[in-house]
Structure formats: C-alpha cells, structure tokens
Image: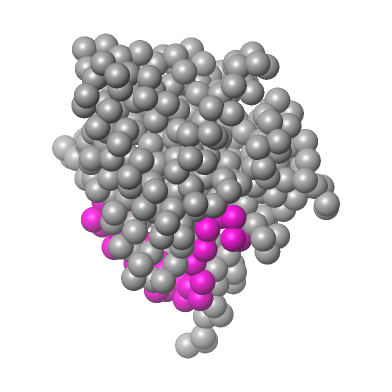
Amino acid sequence: MTEIPQTRLILSTDYELFFHQSGTVQRCLIDPAERLLDFTARHGMKMTFFVDTGMLKCLDRHAAEHRELARQAEIIRAQLRRISSAGHELGLHVHPHWEDTRLSDGAWDFSETRYRLDMFSDDEVVNVLETNFALLQALSDEPVVSYRAGGFCIEPFERIGPTLSRLGVTIDSSVVPGTRLDDPQKGFDASQAPDEPCWRFDEAPRHRVADGAFCEVAITPLTVGRFYFWGRLLNRLGGSRGGEHFGDGVSKAIGRTEVVRRLLGQSRVSELSMDDAKSQLLLDALAAEPSRRAWHVMGHPKLLSERSLQRLEEFAAAANIAEGMTVAAFASHC
Ligand SMILES: [Zn+2]
C-alpha cells in the first residue's frame, strides 16, 4: 500500500439557529459546539466559527423585556469568548433576515422577504455589516478578518466589498466552486469559480485576480449523485425525519420542484460537510480525490450528530491530516 502524503484540514462551522423553527440555543449551539471543541482539542487543531451575529443582535434587541433572551445572549457570548481565547477564529456570518425578524409568542417570526444582503439599500448594507462586525469584534481576542455570506449569497460583492475592506475583513469563505442555486430569493452562482483551495480577487470572488485585495478560502466541492438524494428520501419515507442531529429546530423544507430536480437530475456539486446527512460522503470524497492536499470541511453545530462526528474522525484519520487550521491561517498561505 502506498503511503498517503500529509494534508491540511480547514474546518469551519456556521454558528446559527434554524431558519424555520429556530430550536434552542443550548441544543443548536452550545452543546454541539462543545463537541467540536473536543474534536479540535483531541487533534491539536484550531478551527473557524462563523457566527450569525444577526441572531445576537436580535437577542439584544429584546433582552430588556425578556430575561430568557438576555440569558441566551449571555451564554452565547460566554461560549464565543471562550472559543476565541482558546485560539479558534471567530468569523463574521451575516444572515440579514434577522433585521426583519420579530418576536411572536416567545418564538422568532422570520421574514423571508429579504434573505440576501443585496436586497437591502446601500445605507442599510453598510449599517448591517458595521453593527454585526462590532458585536463580533467585541467577543474576539483577534481582529475579525473572515466573512461568510448567509446562504453563500456573496454576490454582488461590489456592494459589500468596500465596507468589509474598511473593517479589515479581507478573507471570504462563501464559495463552493461549481455550485449554483436558481432561486429568486436565495440564489447564487459559483459555477464559474476557480476549483482551487484559495485564490485572490478584487471585485467578485468568482474572478481570480493575481494580486487582489481579498482572499477566497473556498469550501471543498463534492459531486453528489442522485443516489444520495434517493437515499435521503427513502430514509424519510422509512420514518426517519433525518433528524438525528443534535439541534432541536427545523429547517424550511425545500420546494417540490427542487426535490424533483435533485431526484431526477444529473449529479450536482455540493459542499463537503460534517453535517449529519452529508457526512456519509466524507470518505467518498477522499476516495475520489486521493491527491488533494487541502480539505475544507464545513458544517453547522445544529446539524452535527454522533455519527457525523464519528465520520469526521474517520475522515481525519484516513486523510492523514498533518495540520488542522482556521480559515485565516490558511489564507496566509494563499
Ligand atoms: Zn448560515
């Protein structure tokens, strides 16, 4: 058997609640994030937590009248401060739908009207980025330098790039090369992005510019065949809601047209993920590209499960990971 050369693992996670039925802070964030911290401690590595700061902003907005929400904001902040002081990276993850979210009978009433940041006015875009950044920077021991757009909707970048640059945020990690989602609300198109672990850019992450001011640290793409979606459907029909994950919330179901497209369409590109369902593809990804030297696996604390953490362990062992690092640390090699 030939020896597998050593590789780098970049691990990042979107620290956020569910969009449809939010779930609880304890089970969607606190508990599963601790499990990730156990994993990184065992492997002597650091990782990046992309924090949905809009959630924190919304909790703060209601904290004065609701002691429970004040408590939730407090335990989130305590955990994030601890994560940062342990040497992990806190990155900015902006889901601007929180701007329009209201509290109704103790539950979040999410608005879907403005899912992407480019649906906001110029002044609002600046304000959303500045306020989210300030909330996160207050919790981080290091300057906040990395960004991930909510729902991977990073373009049009022209409207957010100048503000990010002014705030010192010069690394993006919203691109999964080869992916595309046709949806008037949540659509994005990274189908023409370079298939590289990282590159520099100026005006749009999908256009590489040799000495660009920004760096893209891409999430590793993965080709997913129809069998995967059929497997998930059969599981669901067999009584499993696919809900073995730690988080106790519910995502919004995808539309029927999209379901049919996935079941009947060609193979499609998705992100390499440690989340419950997608983690079954981690070892397949490794087998398909044994010579890849940098793997960027993403995920969400809310969607982790016992079995997905186990698969992440197996992946790390099989890939012969020499070094596990944050998005910012990897960008410094770019
Ligand atoms: Zn997100």
Q: Is 137 placed left or right of 172 in the picture?
A: left
Residue 53, above or below 80: above
Residue at x 32%, y 45% (from the top left corner): 78
Q: Quadrant of residue 73?
A: top left
Instruction: State yes or no: residue 219 in magenta.
Output: no
Residue 92 percent coordinates (x, y): 53, 39
Residue at x 71%, y 36% (from the top left corner): 166
Q: Nearer the viewer, residue 296 or 143?
A: 143
The single residue placed furthest to the bottom in the displayed view is: 1
Q: Main secondary structure of the magenta part?
A: helix
Specify how the rendered protein is coloured: one colour
Q: Is 153 placed left or right of 243 in the picture?
A: right
Residue 210 percent coordinates (x, y): 83, 52
Residue 146, above or below 281: above
Residue at x 42%, y 56% (from the top left corner): 85
Instruction: State yes or no: residue 320 in magenta.
Output: yes
Residue at x 59%, y 55% (from the top left corner): 328
Numbered circles on residues, count: 0
Q: Is 254 placed left or right of 168 in the picture?
A: left
Residue 310, above or below 22: below
Magenta range: 302-330
| Quadrant including the C terminus | bottom right
Q: Nearer the viewer, residue 105 or 279?
A: 105
The single residue placed furthest to the left in the displayed view is: 239
Q: Is residue 278 in sight in this rendering?
A: no
Q: Quadrant of residue 60?
A: top left
Residue 235 percent coordinates (x, y): 24, 42
Q: Is residue 331 in sight in this rendering?
A: yes
Residue 88 percent coordinates (x, y): 46, 57
